[in-house]
Image: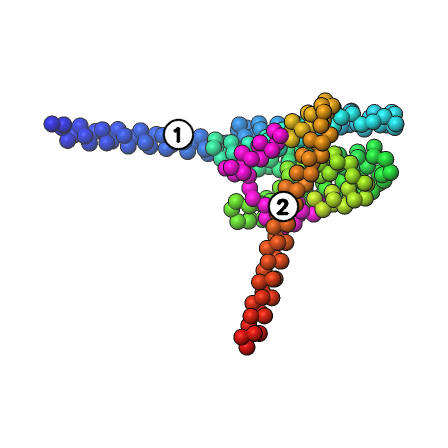
Amino acid sequence: MTDPETIVGLDDEEAVLRRRRWARDRELRAPRSPQHLSTADFLTLGNAVCGFLAIYSITTGVLVPHITNPDAAPDKHSAATAVTLLLIGSMCDLFDGLVARKLRSSALGAELDNLADLISFGIAPAYFVAVWGMVSPDSDSRLSALIALTVLLAVVLRLARFSAVKVRPGVFQGMPCPMGAMTVIAIVLLDPPFLPGLLAIFGAAYLMVSRIEYPKPQGLLATATLCWIVVSIGCLAAWATGLPGGDNLLHIGAFAQIALAAMAPLLVIRRKVGQKVGDVRARRAESRVG
């Protein structure tokens, strides 16, 4: 038979091992000091780098050639590279939160995330709009700069509100900045008539500061978001390289992005209309009974 003291010793040893594992996990998950960067922080910095490189690409490949030769067509490769960089930045933004929750985060995490989002999803799309107003025929550069400013201010307000206002778990109040930025760029890529395009861009900026709730990309939704980013990069590559049907793929992808952004407000409108119809029917039923 096993000695009772041996059993007690084994139980004590297991308890010690459990405490050590718990302490190690707590240490790994505890926020680092501001002097140290976590793995999630490097992803966040990658997002900021992608935003800067996107601005650089659209400047050297679209704006500068247009200034030197106004009759030259915009370079598809540079435009596709810029948008692809922002999509990669969106991927970094998607993963940095997941990594921060799984691994150790740092005290700089939230501040770095807001600053990187401001570059990639605020300054970069606003710059896209401003450049589009300069190179697009029958456009007004001053008006496009004004709408670009509304995009930038919408992102600034959106990020400030995200840090200051608490909402119920699992949702964002207002359209998330990455989705808003990609929606603005999708409108620019479609190259619509100037004034309707500016109105659509202004609508996307409004959705970012609205109180409409958008679901957070978690679980299956995060996987679907990642797949959508990969598909979008494929559509951009087909368009930039001139593959057969590349223009159609770009248009389909851009329209799908705009439709995804409009889905939440459309559902809200549908719910409100349904509630009003239900109230009217209830009043009619009460009047008939009375």
Q: Is residue 287 above or below residue 69?
A: below
Q: Residue 53: in sight, yes or no?
A: no
Q: Residue at x 36, y 30 (%)?
A: 21
Q: Residue 200: in sight, yes or no?
A: yes
Q: Quadrant of the N terminus?
A: top left
Q: Which residues are magenta?
A: 205-231
The location of residue 266, given as percent across then percent down, is: 64, 50
Q: Quadrant of the C terminus?
A: bottom right
Q: Residue at x 55, y 32 (%)?
A: 95
Q: Secondary structure at mark 2?
A: helix
**Amino acid tagged 2:** Met
Determine the image quadrant of residue 36.
Answer: top right
Q: Nearer the viewer, residue 119 or 289?
A: 289
Q: Secondary structure at mark 1?
A: helix
The location of residue 168, given as percent across then percent down, is: 53, 49
Determine the image quadrant of residue 260.
Answer: top right
Residue 220 is a magenta residue = yes
The location of residue 40, given as percent across then percent down, is: 54, 30
Give the left or right position of residue 260, taking residue 21 as reference.
right
Q: Is residue 286 above or below residue 76?
A: below
**Amino acid tagged 1:** Arg
Residue 75 is marked as none
**Residue matched to label 2:** 263
